[in-house]
Amino acid sequence: IHQRVQRLMNIGVIEGSEFIVNSTKLGYNTCAYMGIYLDKAKYHNQVVDALRNIPEVVECHYTTGQYAIFVKIQTKTNKHLKQLIDNELQDVEGIARTETFISLEMDFKRQVPIK
């Protein structure tokens, strides 16, 4: 197993290992996804830099389609999420508007299989 894992690391299929933190055990009970509309495409890097400084934003994707940026947010409560939106996200220069979706439950999460 060690040789196979090392080989996969050497060719770049595996990029490391990580501990998976159970966010609910730390009190982060609200998971939300947010689509972000930008005022102009030129604000992309500036907005991403601002989002990187918000610890509750745990994923950030540059996307095609309706939103320019799509993020995953972990907060302690819905109230915490609202405060984050009102006090931090809406103040980021370059964000025109946002659309937020609260996840009710994660049914599964997985990575692509290694064959």
Image (cartoon, helix red, strand yellow):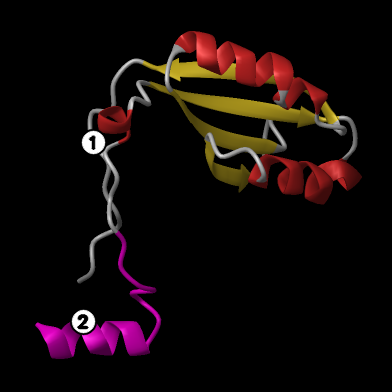
Q: Position of residue 18 (x, y in %)?
A: 31, 61
Q: Secondary structure at mark 1?
A: loop
Kindly indicate the quadrant of the structure image that contains residue 71.
top right
| The C terminus sits in image quarter | bottom left
Give, as a three-letter code, the residue at label 2.
Val
Question: Is 19 drawn above or below residue 100 in the view shown?
Answer: below
Residue lying at 72% horizontally and 37% vertically, measured from the top left: 68
Q: Which residues are magenta?
A: 1-18
Residue situated in front as seen by the camera: 25 or 103: 25
Question: Is 44 drawn above or below residue 100 in the view shown?
Answer: below
Q: CA distance from mark 2 to mark 1?
A: 24 Å
Q: Is residue 99 visible?
A: no
Residue picked out by circle 1: 108
Kindly indicate the quadrant of the structure image that contains residue 69.
top right
Is disc 1 surrounded by few (<14), some (14 to 19) or many (20+) residues within 10 Å? few
Residue picked out by circle 2: 5
Residue lying at 48% horizontally and 23% vertically, measured from the top left: 32
Give, as a three-letter code, the residue at label 1.
Phe
Relative to residue 97, is residue 60 drawn left or right? Answer: left
Residue 8 magenta-drawn? yes
Labels 2 and 1: the sequence-earlier one = 2
Relative to residue 93, is residue 6 drawn left or right? Answer: left
Q: Position of residue 105 (x, y in %)?
A: 29, 20
Q: Position of residue 84 (x, y in %)?
A: 62, 21
Residue lying at 63% horizontally and 27% vertically, measured from the top left: 35
